[in-house]
Image (cartoon, rainbow, N blue to C red):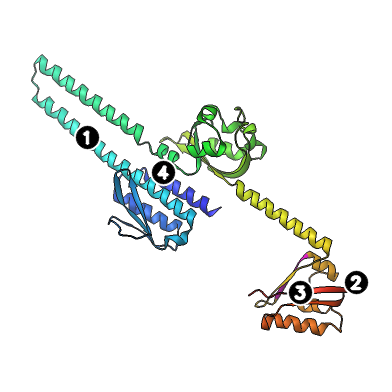
Amino acid sequence: MNRKNSAASDLFLLMLNLSQMTAKDKIIEVFIEALKEIWTGFRIQFTELAPSSDTNLIEISTAGNTYGWLQVENISAMGNEAESLLNNACGMLAVILRKTEQDILLADEKLHLQKLVDKHILELTDSYEELKREAEIRKQAKEKLQKSELQYRNQANFLNVVIDNSPFAMWVSDAKGILLRANEALRNILNVTDDMIIGKYNVLHDENIDAQGFMPAVEAVFKDLKSARFAIFWEGSKAGDVDLSNANGLWIDVSMFPIQDDAGKLVNVVCQYVDITERKQAEEALQESKYLYQETQKIGKMGGWSYDVESEQATFTDTIYEIYGRKNFTAEEGAQFYHPDDKEIVFNSFNEVITKQKPYDLEVRFINAHGDNLFVRTIGQPLI
């Protein structure tokens, strides 16, 4: 697994776990311990003291609220990708801590309202007017509480916050595979709008997944509640029931996992896309370069070799074996193929490369395993 993608998935699952916790100190403790497990070898700790000018600090804050700082010793050594993941994680942690504060405020408000109701009930008499007043107070208190709870649910749905703020393309489907919501990152990499995909795209009908053999893994997410991960080349023209022919075609690393209710029933499926098009293109270019290099060696009758001074092991290309007329020989055995009158200069030049780091370039006579008399050019270049 790609390290960046592994750390991102670990952080995402960590945040889902932290969102279920209620104690601020425990949330921070679990967060720090998890980071230490993900990035072993780095000293990571939490501080509530305001920093002076320490560049190893990441602020944990939301708009108008600062909860502390994450201190990472020698953070620059982690690399840009890891540092970006840490910044995102700290932002999500701040959202969780803000959610915890709102939970406490909501609980206090409930308790306060209940006390008000109880107080008024005790003060009411048996008169009709007093009974009406009691009913009105209860009604107002209930409406205020419902309004407060509704506002909280609309503003503090953690899963929505994580998806909307994730740097990775993400979508959520229902239990039948129909897409319910998508974040901005997904819309950007696919070049689509919500109107094109929400309520229309069904992952279980995606021809890209089916044609490349990964549909059984996707179906297992929905039927067996198993996570899945695979890489495919995705094209909008093969998206299934919906016409996305104008969408971008790209290589994506796909991660999917189920969301269950308290009874263990599938409620949603969350999917994350990571664009790996550049990596795939680089791999293909490397393979092409390797092929061209090998073909060039064959056409030009050029072979390459390397010699490890410490292990005394030699490595040869296939063209070297063709020139020698045999395979599986040591550097010492290979030297015996040079013409008897030229062996000494080859031996001396090879020794000087090792002892004096002095390169050589010789044209000498050569007798291969088939007895063919050849002239060869042998070049030795030290790598220090």
Cα–Cα gap, marks 4 and 2 = 69 Å
Label 2's element? Answer: loop
Cα–Cα span, label 4 and label 3:
60 Å
| In front of the other: 258 or 309 | 309
Question: Residue at horizontal 37%, vertical 52%?
Answer: 31
Q: Which marked residue is nearer to the observer: mark 4 or mark 2?
A: 2
The kind of secondary structure element at disc 1 is helix
Segment tinted magenta in the rendering: 313-317
Report the residue marked by disc 4.
16
Q: Quadrant of residue 239?
A: top right
Q: Is residue 123 above or below residue 77?
A: above
> What's the residue type where badge 3 is placed?
Ile
- Point 56% across, 35% down: residue: 191
Looking at the figure, which quarter contains the C terminus? bottom right
| Residue 174 shown left or right of residue 351 in the figure | left
Q: Which residue is mark 2?
A: 370
Disc nearest the viewer among 2 and 3: 3
Q: Can you say whether 149 is above or below 231 in the image? A: above
Pointer 2 local density, CA inside 10 Å: few below 14, some 14–19, many at least 20: few
Q: CA distance from mark 3 to mark 1?
A: 84 Å
Residue 342 image position (x, y, % from top left): 84, 82
Residue assigned mark 1: 109
